[in-house]
Image (cartoon, rainbow, N blue to C red):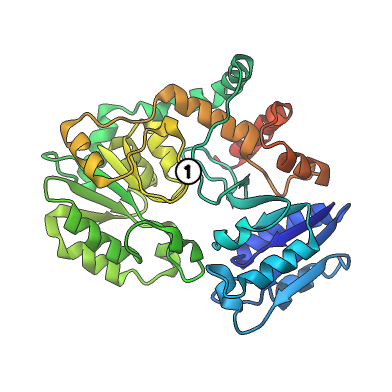
């Protein structure tokens, strides 16, 4: 088989922890091509990555270094040429890490995006991914039979039981968090987890709403009156790598209407998770945090250009979301549906690129058969082993 890795927005971390292991796995028995631009704004492949694969001479590297290579990340100027090149290459499979979905859409073969696998409150290594048709299709479920759902229900039971303490915190725990966070009690709380906005993140082009985050805050402040309170948390990578002064200044402008909370509370618990549990509603875009709102049964607004699973009952606009939250009538994800999605995510979708037992045949099997009960039992066993390590 011929496999193409199309990687315009590959970062060094993603290459080292995710893509290189998959390339190695595929190259053991198939023809592998890599189409990628040279480094720019923290993405692309350069001498460091090529040196790491020096022991794999069979890989065909196609490195774009012309003046238009930066556009490959979001809106390729030379789209026709790229598509023609890929069509002539005629790959059987394409694994993509690109924010330019329009170009990738024209590729031949079975095309899948490599996307983050994170699903709070589950715990497993950050290198675990999912393979899906679009980078931010969230919460999708297949049409399964009764016996298959029963099997997933059986497999998830120990995990679900271990998470019960998170789902049903004591009144004292809730009061302690509310007191620490200084959340008002006279109006609904809207949780707003902000997304990553470092220069290496080109996926911001798909967001609905203003970019960067300080402009989003200003936009929401103009759309949401002071009958609501915005409890905001920053993305952890923003806290590490981004100048947040404009964000902090914007939040401060709105006084008692909103607050930017620290990433963790005094006990070390993740503040976004606590807000997903206790807020009256959560507003998300393409963030994976939607799974936390679903787990806790918190109504959510999801503004996105990508697909959203119907079971999430996510609102699509402020005009319908805000009145429902204010009236206490907002619909949330059903807990039984959430259990089914988490079970399917663990059993069927999560992929560990560093699994020593992972084979090229298994990877191709995932591409040929996106839903396969034959891998469910083993997937849960690997998840259980990994989650024990990460607790």
Question: Can residue 238 be seen by looking at this rendering?
Answer: yes
x, y percent for residue 381: 68, 30
Q: Name the residue rendered at 49%, 61% in the picture.
A: 203
Secondary structure beneath dot 1 equals loop
* Quadrant of the image occupied by residue 107: bottom right
Along the line of sight, which residue is nearer the eye, 135 or 156?
135
The residue lying at 63 percent from left, 15 percent from top is 147
Q: Is residue 106 above or below residue 244?
A: above
* Residue 172 % position (x, y): 25, 30
Query: Can you give x and y, in whole percent of width and height, for residue 37 in the image?
Result: 66, 74
Report the residue marked by disc 1. 307
User: Is 58 left or right of 362, judged from the image as shown?
Assistant: right
- The part of the image, by quadrant, that contains residue 371 is top right
Q: Nearer the viewer, residue 276 or 327?
A: 327
Say if residue 42 shows up in the picture.
Answer: no
**Location of the C terminus (image quadrant):** top right
């Amino acid at each position: 088989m011929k496999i193409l890795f199309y990687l315009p927005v590959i970062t060094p971390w993603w290459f080292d922890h995710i893509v290189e292991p998959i390339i190695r796995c595929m190259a053991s028995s198939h023809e592998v091509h890599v189409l990628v631009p040279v480094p720019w704004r923290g993405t692309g492949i350069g001498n460091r990555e090529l040196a790491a694969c020096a022991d794999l001479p069979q890989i065909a590297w196609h490195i774009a270094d012309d003046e238009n290579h930066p556009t490959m990340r979001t809106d390729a100027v030379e789209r026709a040429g790229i598509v023609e090149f890929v069509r002539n290459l005629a790959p059987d499979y394409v694994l993509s890490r690109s924010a330019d979905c329009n170009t990738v859409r024209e590729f031949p073969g079975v095309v899948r995006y490599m996307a983050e696998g994170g699903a709070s409150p589950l715990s497993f290594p950050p290198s675990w991914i999912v393979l899906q048709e679009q980078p931010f299709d969230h919460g999708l479920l297949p049409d399964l039979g009764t016996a298959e759902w029963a099997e997933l229900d059986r497999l998830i039971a120990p995990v679900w039981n271990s998470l019960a303490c998170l789902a049903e915190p004591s009144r004292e725990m809730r009061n302690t968090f509310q007191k620490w966070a200084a959340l008002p009690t006279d109006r609904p709380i809207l949780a707003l987890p902000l997304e990553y906005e470092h220069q290496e993140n080109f996926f911001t082009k798909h967001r609905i709403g203003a970019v960067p985050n300080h402009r989003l805050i200003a936009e929401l402040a103009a759309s949401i009156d002071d009958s609501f309170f915005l409890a905001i948390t920053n993305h952890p990578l923003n806290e590490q790598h981004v100048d947040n002064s404009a964000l902090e200044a914007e939040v401060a402008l709105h006084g008692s209407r909103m607050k930017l909370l620290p990433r963790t509370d005094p006990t070390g618990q993740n503040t976004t998770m606590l807000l997903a549990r206790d807020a009256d509603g959560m507003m998300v875009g393409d963030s994976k945090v939607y799974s936390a709102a679903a787990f806790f049964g918190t109504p959510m607004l999801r503004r996105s250009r990508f697909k959203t699973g119907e079971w999430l009952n996510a609102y699509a606009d402020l005009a319908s979301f805000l009145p429902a939250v204010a009236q206490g009538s907002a619909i949330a994800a059903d807990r039984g549906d959430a259990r089914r999605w988490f079970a399917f995510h663990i059993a069927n979708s999560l992929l560990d690129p560093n699994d020593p037992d992972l084979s090229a045949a298994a990877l191709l099997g995932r591409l040929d058969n996106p839903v396969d009960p034959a891998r469910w039992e083993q997937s849960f066993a690997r998840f259980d082993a990994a989650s024990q390590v990460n607790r």
